Image (spheres, rainbow, N blue to C red):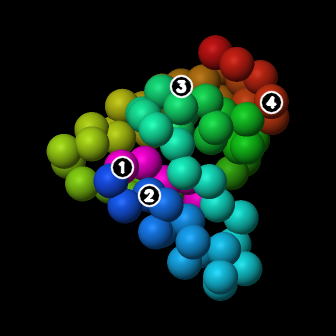
């Protein structure tokens, strides 16, 4: 899980208690970079966020970047 926003650290703490890998990042750009390093073209990614954070831009960039062959540690 990659968490962004005011309560990111709380979300990460809860996810880790449940056994998930999780990281808090400070921005949309950091979320994109973190996700790009974790996903492969065949992966399914859920982006759950409030509209105020505008994380749809991360989803769009991630879909484009992975489709273009980026991912698994690559940068766009």
As for residue 2 lying within the magenta part, the answer is yes
First in sequence: mark 1 or mark 3? Answer: 1
Q: In the rendered view of the protein, which quadrant contains the C terminus? A: top right
Question: What element does badge 2 sit on?
Answer: helix
Judged left or right of residue 51, residue 30 is: right
Q: Are marks 4 and 1 in contact (CB under 8 Å)?
A: no
- Residue at horizontal 49 percent and vertical 54 percent from the top: 3
| Residue 34, x across and y down, in percent | 64, 38
Question: What element does badge 4 sit on?
Answer: loop
Q: Which mark's residue is nearer the viewer, 1 or 3?
A: 1
First in sequence: mark 3 or mark 4? Answer: 3
Against 36, residue 53 (above or below) is below
Residue pointed to by mark 3 = 64
Q: Are marks 2 and 1 in contact (CB under 8 Å)?
A: yes
Residues shaded magenta: 1-5
First in sequence: mark 2 or mark 3? Answer: 2
């Amino acid at each position: 899980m990659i968490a962004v926003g005011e309560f990111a650290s709380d979300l990460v703490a809860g996810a880790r208690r449940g056994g998930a890998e999780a990281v808090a990042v400070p921005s949309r750009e950091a979320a994109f970079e973190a996700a790009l390093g974790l996903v492969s073209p065949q992966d399914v990614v859920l982006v759950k966020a409030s509209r105020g954070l505008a994380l749809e831009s991360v989803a769009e960039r991630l879909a484009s970047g992975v489709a273009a062959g980026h991912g698994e540690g690559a940068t766009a």
